[in-house]
Amino acid sequence: MIKVIISLLIIIGLLFLVLWHSKKTKYICLKCEKTFEISFFTDLIGPHWFTFFGGYKYLKCPNCKQKIKAKEIKN
């Protein structure tokens, strides 16, 4: 029973972390250089990776409609 409660607390904490991240982060398209925000669900399931120079997420740009590696910038 304790393991289930701890697991639920960890999952809820991670969901709040993703919600915070989706509100505080914008992305810039490396093709058309437009900035845009993404939804909580897209932030939750979108593939992403990190380098020494910042984070990236593989997204579809709402401006140029291409699937790109979008650079993460602070909001």
Image (cartoon, rainbow, N blue to C red):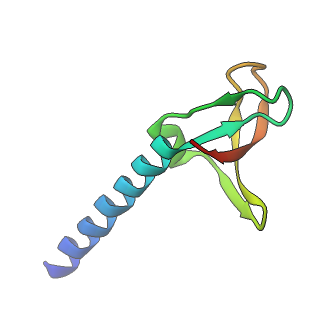
Q: Residue furthest front?
A: 75
Q: Residue furthest left?
A: 1
**Frontmost residue, 42 versus 73:** 73
User: In the rendered image, which quarter contains the C terminus?
Assistant: top right
Q: Position of residue 9 (x, y in %)?
A: 25, 67
x and y percentages locating residue 29 in the rendered image? 77, 34
Q: Who's the residue at 72% across and 19% down the image?
A: 63
4 lies left or right of 41:
left
Q: What residue lies at 83% left-to-right and 26% top-to-bottom? A: 32
Residue 34, placed above or below residue 47:
above
In this view, the residue in front, 27 or 60, is 27
Where does the N terminus fall, quadrant-wise?
bottom left
Considering depth in this image, is 70 or 24 the residue closer to the camera? 24
Image position of 59 (left or right of 45)? right
Give the x, y percent position of residue 39: 49, 34
User: How many numbered marks, from 0 up?
Assistant: 0
Q: Is residue 47 above or below residue 64?
A: below
Residue furthest to the right in view is 31
Residue 7 at what x, y percent from top left? 28, 71
For image coordinates 81% across by 30% down, the residue present is 33
75 lies left or right of 64: left
Q: Quadrant of residue 4?
A: bottom left
Q: Vertically, is 12 above or below 63? A: below
Q: 4 and 22: which one is in front?
A: 22
Residue under the point 70% across and 59% down: 49
